[in-house]
Image (cartoon, grey):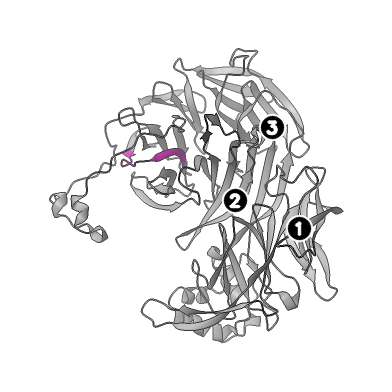
Amino acid sequence: VRGQPASAWPLKEGEETGIRCRTEVGRKFPGFQRLEEAAGGERLGQLLAFSAPAMRNLKLLHSLHCSGWKGLGKPQCLTLRTDTGTLLVGSDLGVTELDPHTEQVLRKVSLVEEAFLPEDGTGCIVGIEDLPDQESVCVATASGDVILYNLNSNQLECVGSVDSGLSGMSWSPDQELVVLTTGQGTIIMMTKDFDAVTEVGIHQDDFGEGKFITVGWGKKETQFHGAEGKQAARCKPVEIQPAFPWDDQKPRVTWRGDGQLFAVSTICPVAGSRKLRIWNRECVLQSTSESVSGLEQALCWKPSGNLIASTQRKLNKHNVVFFEQNGLQHGEFSLPFDKGQVKVNEMVWNSDSTVLAVWLEDLRSTNGGIKDVHQNTYVQLWTVGNYHWYLKQSLHFGGDRAERIVSLMWDPESPYRLHVLCSGWLYLSFNWHWTIDRSTGEESGDFANVAVIDGDKVLVTPFRQTVVPPPMCAYQLQLPCAVNQIVFSSDPQRSNDIAILTTDSRISVYQAGDGVNEDTEIKVGAGGGSGSKKRITIPKLVKTYRIKFEEGASEPLNPLKLRMITWVKESMFLALCQGHRTSQSVVCQLVTSSEESQEGEIQIRYGIWPISEGSSFCRVRERKTQAQRT
């Protein structure tokens, strides 16, 4: 590889190109210098970007925004029919089937007429599952009924009933088994034909079959405690705090991807805190988690099978924590919120275990005894690379009751499609894809920049000037809130300029030319090496523009109304937004104002031309036009 020029490396997205280079990059920084000399710095940034997953960003490819329908009652839960692509929504009155592409209500199944749910709207569906092999949908109610509705014959059948009521229902990934949690604190396991397998109590004193064995290494005071030091032997046990008042007290059940194990999180009746237990497919207890103070309700097993995710509230931070299947804690990362600001409702892994979606909600605050009605909800998408967790996308929903999320799920067949259902029968779906946000790297003045989104920071490395492996970077751009998209200028003379879209619908423009840049000296070093100093050019923030939506739509329901933003001129962007029909997108112009004020304004000109789904833009430099790519 070293003996060939950079132009001889035909790079395509997704190819495992430059394996030898990637291996060399992971060793020591002297290797970076040799690679830089070999590649001439011209396509090294592109090579590293395609080779390192940690340098990728999630970009919105397409979205659906449906609000022109009305189902039965108030929506509570959601599942997807994979064979038809329609939605099955459970509510306090029944089940509604919706087609998101046509915005039509296909059927309404009332559970009030058969007395499965009360007429006053106080009923609750605790679980809903589409069963394609049986051409049916299974529904579990809080009153204790398990109902099977045949989608062909439109027949309702009560296949089981629990007098103490049900608090949850979870099917195995192969849909051969179903686990029901009851009001008496027991687990009922049944086959897909609803034949009972066993019923066991959730709260057991035994650790499980995987109980650790003591090998007689003496007392705790005489054991080696590693980096914790001798003081670890004298530390008093941490007092386990009971569950927080906003915990819904309901059990959570999650299955491993192969369906051989499942985990249950419940409130311990003695300590009042949450505890995690892992069971096998025969409903035999395998292990019990260690006592963790501040453990919360969210629970999701990574489909690849190695980690179980939950959340923990500590003294001064809010963490996502991971457990192994033996119940021991293994790793964590912090959420970017102040103490006591939010609560985590649910967490969901996508099907290929690359993205963790976290659904959060503002905690209710009281001011003079009056409860604050503005309770915002958020969805954050986290990915991991080189043992560092990146916040790649943050979707902010408003505080209006109709915008509050009631259900969140990943598509079982499309790993990067996220489904969101809100309380006002608002449905949104987001199709993401991986992308490398980089400058063109073609001109001699281009620094071959690669930009990585990490919450409210953009991590930038100019590979023509220096090579820094992720999660490190040459410099950071700090934004006031989370970042949604990064755009480099399409103008060859300004290809180092960066425009950044944030969650507050503002675009911040950073300029690297015209004498406004700063030269900063950074030290690049590695373990065992003395390192070297290099001078790099950092772009400077020149202006922030507020996107002005249509009158009365300054706070759109869709948190990502604009996507695929392309910077075509110094004062103009192109973007895609949803048209009047859900399956149609429209190209719109974003034109910046020429005001001298501190914050500018971007006017949106809608409806240039309609295009099909999954389109993006590329620049044709010879003609200085924009070409649509589908």
Q: Which residue is mark 3?
A: 425
Magenta span has 297? yes
Give the vertical position of 555 relative to 247 (above or below): below
Q: Specify start and end residues of the magenta stretch as a single range.
A: 287-299
Residue 430 visible in the current orientation: yes
- Amino acid on which the number 1 mark rests in the picture: Glu
Give the vertical position of 598 relative to 258 (above or below): below
Give the vertical position of 203 relative to 240 (above or below): above
* Residue 394 disc label: 2
Mark 2 Cα within 10 Å, few/some/many (few <14, many 20+)?
many
Q: Nearer the viewer, mark 3 or mark 2?
A: 2
Tell me the quadrant of the picture where the C terminus can be found: bottom right
Say which residue appears at 61% left-offset and 37% top-offset: 374
Mark 1 Cα within 10 Å, few/some/many (few <14, many 20+)?
some
Say which residue appears at 62% left-offset and 15% top-offset: 120
- Amino acid on which the number 2 mark rests in the picture: Ser
State the image quarter where residue 272 is shown: top left
Q: Nearer the viewer, mark 1 or mark 3?
A: 1
Residue 282 visible in the current orientation: no
Q: Nearer the viewer, mark 2 or mark 1?
A: 1
Q: Is residue 167 left or right of residue 43?
A: left
- Spatial CA distance of label 1 from label 3 is 32 Å
- Judge by depth and name the residue closer to the eye, 224 or 296: 296
